[in-house]
């Protein structure tokens, strides 16, 4: 059992193998947060202190000057009840007031994990999970909140979500709705968020949570390149290997808001969910808003362990479909080789070269449809441009298949070019505000995916295309942020504030239909690379193109940040040509291979331009990757250095039983008279004896972990090393 209710003290305890989460519905009906962290025993309400504190008044009906919502730790704090900190819920009532006084009504504990209609969520079998549902209500407005908690005991995962409904008579507007609020009564904390920009996503940024407020979020319609919807709350001394930390991952691909603050009495609060400018969700009587869920995990042993908890949760309880558990094909993508300049022969030529190299699949990227010879036109016209290809899609896929290669294709269903037949027919389908000229990005507009008829039209076109040949893979792209947000689909003015949320639900609805109709097609998500790299998308697409930046040096850093929450099986990573198209840097083919092998491996270059020697190297890389694919996509993952600070980037994969390991190191710096670089390994069995495959040298696990491996001092830029270790004796 993972969920307990102590009826005498009204205390709820959620327990996983190594963690406890506790809350209490007190005698006033408020749901107070008591604890989340390493497993503990007993009731934690002894932590609560009550005394009269100036300017922190009492809530309605409480004639006790020592009781204030302004200081108590809470599960789901609301605005308007005298808690002046960041809150989880803001409700604007029919009369324009902002107040919602939620009190405990009832609860239910059941087997299995709750689901969320129309939204991605962690899934688990009845034996693997339990659900707690707590009903709270504001008597005056009859706004009800069902707090949902899922506990995956063995996985050390707790999920939280909220269903907000209006049981009253008039309309209310939800201005903010979080799925999680975590209050820490004591201690100092840091917040680690993953910030960046297009082509440089998810760079970890650690700040002290101080007085005032620290906010990250997205208002771009996608979870964004700029701030990832996943953060870590850590003790100041927490490192990769030691210390307490809690990860909070929002399973959602649209706008989000994450706020952290330390209050006047040093309580730390972190809130994650929907909110911020542009979000207003009207609820009529009987209507409900489902807040996307947040996944929580706690590690008492640093970030390394925390990451592995999230990796396993994503791989086994978020990603779905046959590919979530299968090794993905090694692919070659046409984009950086040809951009828009290709025909059917180019793709066949690419497939032919690639098949000789052991690659499994060719992907025809942007440019195969409508009028699309550059990025100024054609989006929305998902008809194969047979004139450009010089053949039908069926013929092309057949030719590719005859070479023993799988075939993949690029689409960008959410978008529309003004220069397209779709726009000429349905200009009103593009999101734009009446009476205003819409802003363009990449010369394109966004389709109003809140509208069923729009989604259906695009879906039909895309299915018609997919049904023409044997398609094994889709790259689903999204190449601009949402501005000029407006939908003719909305019944009234207030409802414009829910357009972005409904848009994301529209995208999910489309994806759900697509994966149901084509369960054998592997879908890779993409948003100008990693602009929508989140657990929400991973529910539909088990891998995501990590970044439009394929430079191996930058990728070491981007993939480092990405690895804190997301497993290597989710990270699309390719070897591209040099000089690199984004940075102009020249990095050896070997190092480019080592870096790309930390994800779902592939190529993005013209193999015809490779020398014979390079071709042999690629062949060897593909063999090498396939040999390690299981370990890379399912093994434990450890960061061995911080490439933002250290002279090298280093990481390793370890098999579940600790008998095999693959270590990768990329030198980021090289200097005259260079000191020796040592890298300490992790996750091995201390007493076991390991053999390094290349040198046949033997080392004890303890030595490799305590003192490390020794790297050669060599001349050259961005040299890299890959070492494979096998256990030769468990107790050497
Ligand atoms: C985005 C993707 C690229 C490529 C182009 C095509 O930028 O991230 O990989 O598919 O679009 O237009």
Image: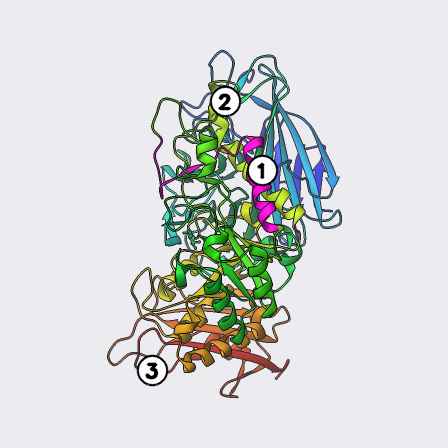
Relative to 31, is 97 on the left or the right? left
Q: Residues within 10 Å of mark 1 (few under 14, many from 20)?
A: few
Q: Splitting the image into 4 quarters, where does residue 558 fall?
A: bottom left
Q: Is residue 84 above or below residue 686?
A: above
Q: Is residue 683 magenta?
A: no
Lower position in the chain sequence, tag 2 or tag 3: 2
Residue sticking out furthest to the bottom: 696
Q: CA distance from mark 1 to mark 2?
A: 45 Å
> What span is colored magenta in the figure?
438-466
Residue 59, percent across and down?
52, 20
Under tag 3, what secondary structure? loop
Question: Measured from the top left, where is residue 345 in percent x and y?
Answer: 47, 64
**Mark 2 or mark 3, whichever is nearer to me:** 2
Residue behind mark 3: 713
Please identify, in this view, whether the residue under mark 1 or under mark 2 is nearer the observer: 2
Q: Decide: marks 1, 2 in contact (CB < 8 A)?
A: no
Magenta run includes residue 458: yes
Mark positioned earlier in the residue sequence (1 or 2): 1
Is residue 91 at least partly visible in the picture?
A: yes
Nearest the camera: 253 or 80? 253
Cβ of mark 3 under 8 Å from ligand 1: the answer is no
Relative depth, front residue between 350 and 591 = 350
Percent from the top left, x then y, of residue 138? Answer: 59, 20
Mark 3 neighbour class, 10 Å CA radius: few under 14, some 14 to 19, many 20 or more: few
Q: Is residue 281 above or below residue 115?
A: above
Mark 2 CB lies closer than 8 A to ligand 1: no
Residue drawn 44% across and 33% down? 424
């Amino acid at each position: 059992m993972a969920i307990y209710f102590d009826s005498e003290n009204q205390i709820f305890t959620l327990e996983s193998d190594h963690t406890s989460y506790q809350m209490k519905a007190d005698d006033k009906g408020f749901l107070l947060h008591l604890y989340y962290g390493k497993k503990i025993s007993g009731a934690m309400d002894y932590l609560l202190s009550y005394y009269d504190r100036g300017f922190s008044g009492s809530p309605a009906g409480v004639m006790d000057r020592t009781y204030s919502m302004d200081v108590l730790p809470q599960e789901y704090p609301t605005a308007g009840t005298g808690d002046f900190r960041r809150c989880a819920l803001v409700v604007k009532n029919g009369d324009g007031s902002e107040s919602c006084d939620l009190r405990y009504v009832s609860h239910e504990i059941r087997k299995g994990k709750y689901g969320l209609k129309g939204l991605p969520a962690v899934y688990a079998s009845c034996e693997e999970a339990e659900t707690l549902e707590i009903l709270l209500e504001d008597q005056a407005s009859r706004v009800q909140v069902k707090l949902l908690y899922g506990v995956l005991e063995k996985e050390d995962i707790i999920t939280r979500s909220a269903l907000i409904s209006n049981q009253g008579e008039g309309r209310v507007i939800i201005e903010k709705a979080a799925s999680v609020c975590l209050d820490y009564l004591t201690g100092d904390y840091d917040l680690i968020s993953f910030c960046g920009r297009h082509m440089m996503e998810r760079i970890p940024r650690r700040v002290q949570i101080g007085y005032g407020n620290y906010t990250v979020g997205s208002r771009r319609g996608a979870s964004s390149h700029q701030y990832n919807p996943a953060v870590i709350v850590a003790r100041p001394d927490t490192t990769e290997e030691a210390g307490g930390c809690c990860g909070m991952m929002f399973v959602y691909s649209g706008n989000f808001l994450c706020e952290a603050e330390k209050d006047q009495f040093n309580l730390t609060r972190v809130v994650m969910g929907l909110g911020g400018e542009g979000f207003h969700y009207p609820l009529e009587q009987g209507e409900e808003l489902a807040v996307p869920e947040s996944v929580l995990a706690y590690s008492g042993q640093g970030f390394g362990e925390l990451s592995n908890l999230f990796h396993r949760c994503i791989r086994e309880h978020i990603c779905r479909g046959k590919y979530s558990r299968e090794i993905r094909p090694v692919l070659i993508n046409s984009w950086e080789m040809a951009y828009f300049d290709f025909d059917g022969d180019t793709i066949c030529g690419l497939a032919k070269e690639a098949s000789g190299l052991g690659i499994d699949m060719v992907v025809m990227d942007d440019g195969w449809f409508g009028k699309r010879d550059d990025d100024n036109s054609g989006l929305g016209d998902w008809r194969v441009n047979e004139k450009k290809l010089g053949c039908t899609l069926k013929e092309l896929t057949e030719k590719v298949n005859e070479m023993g290669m799988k075939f993949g294709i690029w689409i960008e269903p959410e978008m529309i070019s003004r220069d397209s037949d779709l726009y000429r027919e349905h200009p009103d389908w593009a999101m734009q505000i009446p009476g205003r000229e819409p802003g363009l990005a990449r010369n394109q507009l966004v389709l109003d995916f809140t509208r069923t008829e729009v989604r259906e039209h695009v879906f039909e076109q895309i299915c018609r295309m997919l049904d023409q040949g044997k398609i094994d893979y889709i790259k689903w792209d999204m190449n601009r942020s949402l501005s000029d947000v407006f939908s003719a689909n909305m019944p009234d003015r207030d409802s414009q504030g829910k357009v972005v949320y409904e848009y994301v639900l529209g995208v999910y609805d489309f994806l759900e239909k697509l994966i149901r109709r084509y369960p054998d097609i592997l879908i890779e998500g993409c948003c100008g690379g990693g602009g929508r790299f989140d657990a929400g998308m991973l529910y539909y697409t088990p891998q995501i193109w990590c970044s439009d930046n394929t430079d191996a040096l930058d990728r070491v850093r981007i993939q480092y940040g990405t690895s804190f929450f997301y497993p290597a099986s989710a990270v699309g990573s390719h070897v591209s040509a040099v000089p690199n198209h984004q940075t102009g840097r020249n990095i050896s083919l070997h190092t480019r291979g080592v870096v790309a092998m930390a994800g779902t491996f592939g190529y993005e270059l013209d193999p015809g331009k490779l020398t014979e020697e390079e071709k042999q190297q690629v062949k060897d890389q593909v063999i090498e990757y396939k040999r390690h694919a299981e370990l890379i996509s399912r093994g434990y993952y450890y960061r061995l250095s911080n490439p933002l600070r250290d002279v090298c980037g280093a990481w390793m994969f370890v098999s579940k039983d600790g008998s095999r390991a693959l270590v990768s190191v990329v030198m980021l710096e090289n200097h005259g008279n260079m000191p020796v670089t040592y890298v300490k390994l992790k996750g091995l069995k201390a007493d076991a004896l390991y053999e390094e495959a290349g040198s046949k040298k033997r080392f004890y696990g303890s030595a490799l972990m305590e003192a490390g491996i020794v790297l050669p001092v060599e001349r050259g830029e961005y040299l890299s090393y890959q070492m494979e270790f096998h256990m030769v004796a468990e107790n050497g």
